Every structure is written in C-alpha cells, then in structure tokens.
Image: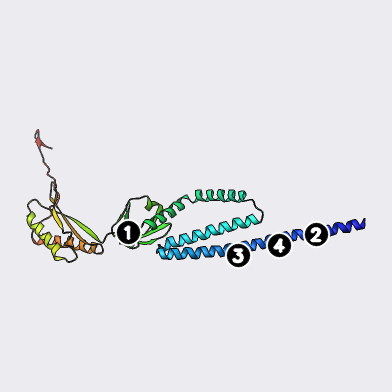
Amino acid sequence: MEDLTRAERIIQRFMDSDKLWDLGMTVLSLVVMIVVGLLILKVILKITRKALDKSRLDEVLYSFIVNAIKAVGIIVLITMCLGILGVQMSTIITVIGAAGAAIALALKDSLANIAGGIMIIITQPFSRDDYIDVDDVSGKVKDIDLFLTTLRTYDNKTITIPNGIINTSILVNHSKEGIRRVDCQFRIGYDSDVSLAKELMHGICEANPMILRDPEPNIGISDQDENAIIMNMFAWCATDDYWTVKDYMEEEVKRLFDENEIRTPAPWVNVRIEERNGGKR
C-alpha cells in the first residue's frame, strides 16, 4: 500500500512538471509575440512616417494616421496574445464588435466631427489665416484640428465650430483667390449730376495704386427708388488689401461728393390732409 502511494506521488510530480512546462511555454510564446509584434509595429510606423513625410500631408492628418495605425496594431497584438492564452477568437471578435458598436453610438457626434475634420484637411476648402463665412459666422481661421475649427473675428472674439457642422454647411472663403472685388453702393439725389458723380468715382479708382486696372473698375447706376438714384462702384484689389481699399473708397466718395454738392437725399414721406364735412382728416 505504501509503494502504491509512492508511485502515485511520482506520477503526480510528472504531471505537475508537464503543467509547469506548458505554462512556461505559454509565457515564452506570449513574450515572443509581444516583442515581435512591437518590433513589426515599429517598422510599420517608421515606413508610414517616411511615406507621409514625402506626401507633405497636413500635420493634423499626419498625427491622426500615425495614431490610428498604432491603435489598430496594438488591438491586433492584444487579440493575438489572448489567443495564445486560450481565449476563443470568436469570443474576442464578438466583444470587440459589441464594444465598437457601443463606442460608435456613444460618440457619433464626435466621430462626425472627426470625419468632417479629415474631409477639411484632405479637400482643403480653407487654410489657416483665411477669412471665411460659415452660415452666419465669419472670421479668420486660426486653427484646424480633427474636432474643431477655430476662428478669430476682427473684433478679437474666438469662435469654435465643430467640423461636422462645417462639412455640411455652405462655406464662403474670401481669401482663396489672390484678388477680390470691393463692392460699394452710394445714393444720390435725382437733381444731382450723374455724369459728374461717375467721373469722380473713376478718379478715386485711378488715384489709388492698390486698385487694379485689370479687371477694370465698374461704375454705374444699379437702381432708382422713390428717393434716390443708387450707384454701384465695383473695384478689384489684392485680397490682403480689401479692407484698406474699401475704407478708402467709402471715405473718398463721401469727401468728393460733399465738395461737389452731390447730396445723399434723406427719406421723405408725402402726407396729404383732406377736409371733409368741415373737419380735417
């Protein structure tokens, strides 16, 4: 009986040795998988960075692509390590899918902003320091990231707009082209000399070197209402000179119109009083 017990102990020891061996091999395989996986990921990231450097991609999209590859690589590595530990791949895929769906649902607005940011960076409808209109918001672009675009207004206010909104809104970029047209309208009375007014406005355009000769300025009557003749004054200039030229045109027209007695009529209303049956109405 004692010999049988001793034999059982020897068998149990061998069995424990096999388990210890299996555990050691599992740990070794896990370590090798992690080391090799990290090395492969490092090589992939190095190749990706070289390719992105040659493409001269925007730094925001550059960082996003690198971080996305890094995140996917780590997820794949973790999945393979769990497989070595005996976790079924179907279970891992199910958990990842469920987690991904829950995260996507919870962060749908943020994901829309990221998608909008990527589209802005790829299509480049505007760049930093461009002056843009988005719906009823206007300002100079100060920063573009994956979630938000930051504008600075001329009165020094900071406006942040989610990229998802920008991507689905009508956008006007005033700085995209090298030149821009300055549009001004002026009202003069019906008793004013229209030919003199046009001559003065042409002289204003010719006197300023910032106003381009090609395309040439366009000056003429655009409309006539009850009180005044409405005249358009359109002139082209470099985009960076827009506000300087606009202020110049407005001020010079006012000054020369006053000097030449070309008046802007005030609105008037004709009131008629009738007498009926001895009384006034």
Q: Which mark is residue 35?
A: 3
Give the crowd class for mark 2: few <14, some 14-19, many >=20 residues within 10 Å.
Answer: few
Q: Nearer the viewer, mark 3 or mark 1?
A: 3
Q: CA distance from mark 4 to mark 3?
A: 16 Å
Pointer 2: what residue? 14
Structural distance between the alpha carbons of marks 2 and 3 = 31 Å
Say whether marks 3 and 1 touch (CB < 8 Å). Answer: no
Amino acid type shown at disc 3 = Val
Q: Earlier in the sequence, mark 1 or mark 4?
A: 4
Q: Nearer the viewer, residue 60 or 45?
A: 45
Foreground residue among 7 and 167: 7
Q: Secondary structure at mark 3?
A: helix
Q: Earlier in the sequence, mark 4 or mark 2?
A: 2
- Residue 268's place in the image compared with 196, above or below, is above
Residue 235 image offset from top left, x and y in percent: 18, 59
Q: Which mark sits nearer the N-terminus, 2 or 3?
A: 2
Q: Secondary structure at mark 4?
A: helix
Q: CA distance from mark 1 to mark 4?
A: 64 Å
Q: Which residue in the structure is indicated by mark 1?
A: 139
Q: In the rendering, at what x and y percent does residue 39 appear?
A: 56, 65
Left or right of 74? Residue 4 is right
- Quadrant of the rendered structure where residue 272 is? top left
User: Where the N terminus falls, by quadrant?
Assistant: bottom right
First in sequence, mark 1 or 2: give its number: 2
Whichever of labels 3 and 1 marks the residue nearer the N terminus, that label is: 3
Under mark 1, the amino acid is Gly
Residue 94, image x and y in percent? 59, 48
Which of discs 1 and 4 lies nearer the camera? The answer is 4
- State which tag comes first along the sequence, 4 or 3: 4
Quarter of the image where one finds residue 278: top left
The numbered mark at residue 24 is 4
